[in-house]
Structure formats: structure tokens, C-alpha cells
Image: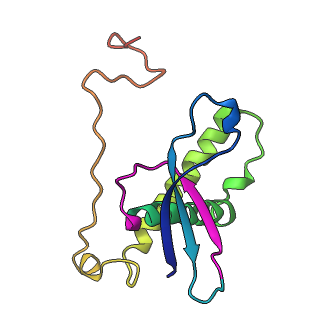
């Protein structure tokens, strides 16, 4: 995906007459594709003034990837298929769906062009195991070492 972008520092003037001081400065990011006659998309962002245009655009466009992942979770892996009536059941369902999605993303990375072919040849793809605190006791466990 390619496009042209411009970024300006602006102050939103929405109902400033009710405020004792004006709104803080924000970024106004403008997208103007080369094939269009005028800009097509606008975003306001409260990211720091020191951020580069490249990083501002990357963070703004990250939303597209998140939305695509969410749609894939719903359509391909069944995140939207839960029909229970309590939070705990939904939480378990969502956890399993997200774990399955993580596994599928890792598997996709094994194959070019989306992955690194040198990792495919060596098979050296490992995720670090999370460590638990020394005094950790799982919730619901019985025993003398149970923490409160």
C-alpha cells in the first residue's frame, strides 16, 4: 500500500468558548492518494510532537491490520460463534480462539514470502517460555504455600 501523506500540528477548536484554555495541539494527518483529485482521509492524533511522519503513518495504519486480524478471528476461527451467557465462558472461548490464531500466524511465518526462508531451512523458530514467580500458586490450588 502506498500513498502520500502530510502532517500538521493543529488545535481543535470544538467548543473552546466553554473552556478556560484552548485544547492542546494534536497531529492532523492527511492521506492523499496519487490517483485522487483531493485528499481522501484525515486523522487527529495526540501522539507526541517529536514523532516522525513515517512513525505517525505507521501507527495510524496499524488500525487496518488490527481490524483485518479481528475479522479473521471472527470469520475463520469462530470468535463470534460463542453463544454462552456468562463472562467466564466467553473468556475461555476467546482465549482458545486467540491462542489458535497465534499458532496459525506462527505457522504462516514459516513459509515465504511472508516469512524468512532461512528460518524455514534451519527450523529455528522458538518463543521464550514465560517464567512464573517463585512463590506462585495457581488459583484454586490447595496447600500450605497458598498466597492471599
Residue 31's place in the image compared with 82, above or below, is below
Q: Nearer the viewer, residue 23 or 95?
A: 23
* The C terminus lies in quadrant: top left
Q: Quadrant of residue 17?
A: top right
**Residue 104 % position (x, y):** 48, 66
- Most extreme residue toward the bottom, as rendered? 35
Q: In the drawing, does residue 67 fall left or right of residue 138? A: right
Q: Which residues are magenta?
A: 38-54
**Residue 55 % position (x, y):** 39, 63
User: Residue at coordinates 29% horizontally, 82% vertically from top-left?
Assistant: 117
Q: Nearer the viewer, residue 10 or 53?
A: 10
Magenta residue check for 53:
yes
User: Residue at coordinates 24% horizontally, 25% vertically from top-left?
Assistant: 134
Residue 50's place in the image compared with 121, above or below, is above
Q: Nearer the viewer, residue 18 or 98?
A: 18
**Residue 91 % position (x, y):** 61, 39
Magenta residue check for 122:
no
**Residue 81 % position (x, y):** 74, 54
The colour scheme used here is: rainbow
User: Residue at coordinates 73% horizontally, 33% vertically from top-left?
Assistant: 86
Residue 39's place in the image compared with 134, above or below, is below
Q: Nearer the viewer, residue 12 or 77?
A: 12
Q: In the drawing, does residue 145 fall left or right of residue 3? A: left
| Tag count | 0
Q: Quadrant of residue 88?
A: top right
Residue 41's place in the image compared with 10, above or below, is below
Amino acid at each position: 500500500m502506498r500513498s502520500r501523506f502530510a502532517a500538521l500540528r493543529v488545535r481543535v477548536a470544538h467548543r473552546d468558548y466553554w473552556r478556560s484554555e484552548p485544547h492542546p495541539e494534536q497531529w492532523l494527518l492527511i492521506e492523499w492518494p496519487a490517483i485522487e483529485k483531493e485528499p481522501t482521509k484525515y486523522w487527529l492524533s495526540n501522539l507526541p510532537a517529536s514523532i516522525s511522519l513515517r512513525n505517525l503513518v505507521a501507527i495510524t495504519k496499524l488500525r487496518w491490520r488490527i481490524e483485518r486480524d479481528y475479522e479473521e478471528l471472527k470469520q475463520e476461527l469462530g470468535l463470534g460463534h460463542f453463544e454462552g451467557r456468562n463472562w467466564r465462558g466467553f473468556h475461555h472461548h476467546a482465549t482458545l480462539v486467540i491462542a489458535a490464531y497465534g499458532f496459525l500466524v506462527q505457522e504462516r511465518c514459516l513459509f515465504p514470502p511472508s516469512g524468512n526462508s532461512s528460518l524455514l531451512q534451519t527450523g529455528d523458530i522458538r518463543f521464550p517460555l514465560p517464567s512464573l514467580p517463585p512463590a506462585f500458586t495457581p488459583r484454586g490450588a490447595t496447600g500450605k504455600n497458598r498466597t492471599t
